[in-house]
Image (cartoon, helix red, strand yellow):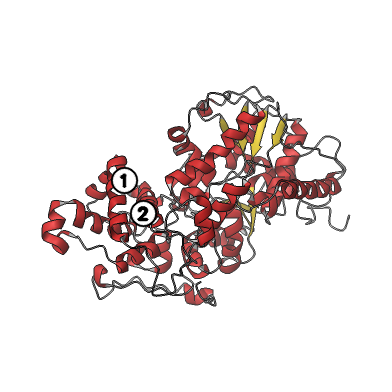
Amino acid sequence: MAPKVKLPKPGELSNISYNTPATDWMDTPVDFKPGTYAWGAKEKDLLTLGLPNPRQWSPAEEDWKLPEGWESTILDGIAERLSKYRSFKIFMDICVRCGACADKCHFYIGSGDPKNMPVLRAELLRSVYKKYFTKSGKFLGRLAGARELTEDVLKEWWYYFFQCTECRRCSVFCPYGIDQAEITIIGRELLNLVGLNLDWIAGPAAACYMKGNHLGLEPHAIKGNIETMLDDIEDLTGITIEPSFNRKGAEILFVTPSGDLLGDPGIYTNMGYLMLFHELGLDYTWSTYASEGGNFGFFTSNDTAKRLNYKIYAEAKRLGVKYIIGGECGHMWRVLNQYMDTWHGPADFLEVPKSPITGTVFENAKSTKMIHITEFTADLIKNNKLKLDPSRNDHLKVTFHDSCNTSRGMGLLEEPRYIIKAACNNFYEMPENTIREKTFCCGSGSGLNATENMEERMRGGFARANAVKYVREKHGVNVLANICAVDRAALPTLMDYWVPGVSVYGTHELLANALVMKGEKERTTDLRGDDLPGKEGND
């Protein structure tokens, strides 16, 4: 277990050196500094997932208890993936080290560590590939950029491949289209072959495999948490909402990330879903079994991600719904948009999503039969199906964080903005080179949202925080909105550290504040209990 460490003050952490190290990168050892890495995966979780070489080990110890013959396991794994994924071999061969990606990674920006440059992080794996799989590397060795696979090299892989959030920002700038996230995914798969993973990845993935969600919530706990939210909604609006659970024959299955079932501020986003669907009279149901939209298996191995993704479609088939709506989540949509069809698709037992309120057919979901909640809601607003009072959010000055997986991974750029602008009068964009396809990461994605690696998380989120700080100082922004459960979990800590005074909201929380529901009593507070403008002291 990694030792606990005190987080440096922001002034200390922002003192970043970008000076080139005195030694060549191959000769610069990894410094396993506490606060910059997370705990290793537990044996019980690897056993639950059926992953190879489960054992108790710690990255803080010298002996990682690697299995006998681990070198052959890794090399065989590389060979298998070279034969299986054409993109992997292309990415290994075509990089010309132009440096276009070098300063685009938020972890390099926040740490100054050259091995966090995407080009050099890829070189950690590419150098071993060259040694064992290219003629030049076999004969010329280091002159060709090749090196032996040693235990120190393996530890270096583990350290840096788990300092990449697979956000794909670097790929936007690469003139050759190299996707560093795919290299990181391969690197992590290879590490998994010898039992090297993170506790905060394997633990949630194992819980999801056994219980249907990352938090390990039982069906009665899920139902109980939602019922508590319903009580709060009734206190706020005077309206009683009665959603259904595991109901066969419903038109729509709704799946949300489990963070919205339990965590603050995700619960307010979940209240927004409940209020919206009730107002529409939507024929939908929740599942207490496929109770997780997110997919931590994606940060483990292709096979694990595939298994965890399938439960959503298996439950849709069991319940006999027509199609699926998914909540505000990041990697649920990256997996769905880029991988699901290869694994299970097309989902021909479902129908192409069609809004029962507007009649809009979502042709973009013709294969997956699953649409994002912001697509659904933006369509409602466009067709004047919701009554909104944006003045209820006038105490909030809002900016929007494009979550990596929904922006670069799915192209959801305008829909959340359309909703926010309809629900809020005060919206301000961050600088152009920090949003949309060029958005900076929260610094805690791909399973890095632990506590023991907090220094690295704050470094990884430094670039995003700077952009928020800009609009806070210029416009008085006090809300950072998003459409990702990991962001809602990670960004509050980041804001408290770098930009105090900025709160984190889900987009549908803002919508719910503005939503004028039929039969509601006069509201005096927003979902969080803060006074609405002009209603101060009316409680």
With respect to residue 150, does 168 lie above or below?
Answer: above
What is the x, y in percent for residue 16? Answer: 41, 72
Name the quadrant containing residue 287.
top right
Residue drawn at 44 percent across, 73 percent down: 60
Crowding near pointer 1: few (<14 within 10 Å), some, many (20+)?
some
Q: In the depicted view, which residue is nearer to us: 342 or 36? A: 342
Q: Could you tell me which secondary element the residue under label 2 belongs to?
A: helix
Mark 2: which amino acid? Leu
The residue at which mark 2 appears reads as: 190
Mark 1: which amino acid? Arg
Real-space Cα separation, disc 1 to disc 2, in angstroms: 9 Å
Name the quadrant containing residue 65.
bottom left
With respect to residue 368, does 514 lie above or below?
Answer: below
Outermost left residue: 139
Give left or right: position of 91 versus 413.
left
Q: Report whether residue 436 is seen.
A: no
Q: Earlier in the sequence, mark 1 or mark 2?
A: 1
What is the x, y in percent for residue 228? Answer: 79, 50
Give left or right: position of 376 versus 535.
left
Q: Residue 81's mark?
A: 1
* Proximity of marks 1 and 2: CB atoms separated by less than 8 Å: yes
Residue drawn at 46 percent across, 68 percent down: 57
Q: In the depicted view, which residue is nearer to us: 382 or 311? A: 311
What is the x, y in percent for residue 488? Answer: 61, 54
Q: In the depicted view, which residue is nearer to us: 350 or 67? A: 67
Quadrant of the image containing the C terminus: bottom right
Q: In the depicted view, which residue is nearer to us: 395 or 70? A: 70
Q: Could you tell me which secondary element the residue under label 1 belongs to?
A: helix
Give left or right: position of 300 versus 154.
right
